Image (cartoon, rainbow, N blue to C red):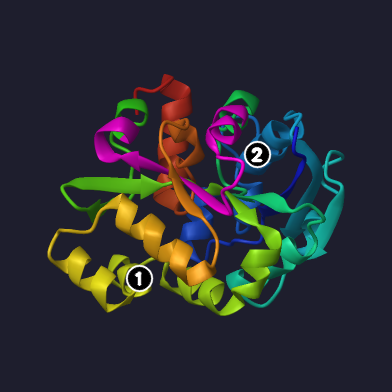
Amino acid sequence: MEKLDAVVLAAGRFAGPEADRAGAAIKALVKVASTTPFDAVVAALRASAAIDRLVVVAPRELHGCSRVVDAWVDEGATGEDNVLAGLASARTHRAVLSASDLPFVEPAHVESFLMRVPPDADFAYPVYERAEFLATFPRSRTRFARVGPAQYTGGSMCIVNVKLALANERLIRHAFAARKSQLAMASLLGSGGLVRYLTGRLAIEHVERRLSELTGGRAVAIRGAPPALAMDCDSAAEVEYARTYHAGVGSA
């Protein structure tokens, strides 16, 4: 079995009123029921037989808050810096790169995702059609992007070829900066990809092929992974949804 280091990004913050609504400024410290999404993520990853070292990029005040973490990396000035610093600390050929704000992730979800990733994939990212995701998390605040005739959202856990990712630092920085804008993300695919997006002709296969060309590796969209990998707490509204969902066992 291939062993993978896991890199968890735990430096995200809420600002001002958002922090007050969420109950914490650092997203990793937000409580959903009796635990934090950060605790859920590291526990799920640590339980996987495929995970070797568990590396967390976080503010100094979080360092040492979990005994199952093997290495702590100081946060950088930007989110892109955190991604690159975390990957630079990985020692395996491929690594799991994960957000820390997934309140419902379980060990079985990690295993389900990993078993779907082809052994020769350099970049593997779970995707979910709108109906598929909302069947598990109805009325969630998750954003969807139109790709061809369908709407999709993506997971907050992926597989990356560490060496190849670090060699594509410029692309990673651009992608991270563009992640909140569908148009900006489409523009990363080049003029052809942008035109396809604007005319409703962009398909998942086009994205896979173009990202493979840009990175020099094989990029794969993973279907059928558990939707909990995409249910994050990126805003105070999503934190409130997660708390309501947990209390109602899916009736949010």
The residue located at (78%, 52%) in the rendering is 92
Which quadrant would the C terminus be assigned to in this image? top left
Of residue 176 and residue 94, the one placed in the foreground of this image is 94
Q: Which three-letter amino acid code belongs to the residue tagged 2?
A: Val
Q: Is residue 81 left or right of residue 221?
A: right
Residue 227's x, y, as percent?
A: 43, 33
The residue located at (31%, 31%) in the rendering is 132
Question: Eyeballing the image, is 242 above or below 220?
Answer: above
Q: Is residue 213 magenta?
A: no
Find disc 2 in the rendering and name its residue.
41
For the record, the magenta segment spans 111-133
Q: Is residue 115 magenta?
A: yes
Residue 209 in sight in this render: yes
Q: Quadrant of residue 198?
A: bottom left
Q: Residues within 10 Å of mark 1 (few under 14, many from 20)?
A: many
Residue 155's x, y, as percent?
A: 47, 45
Question: Eyeballing the image, is 112 above or below 211?
Answer: above
Of tags 1 and 2, the one toward the viewer is: 1
Q: Is residue 215 left or right of residue 250?
A: right
Under tag 1, what secondary structure?
Answer: loop
Q: Which three-letter amino acid code belongs to the residue tagged 1?
A: Leu
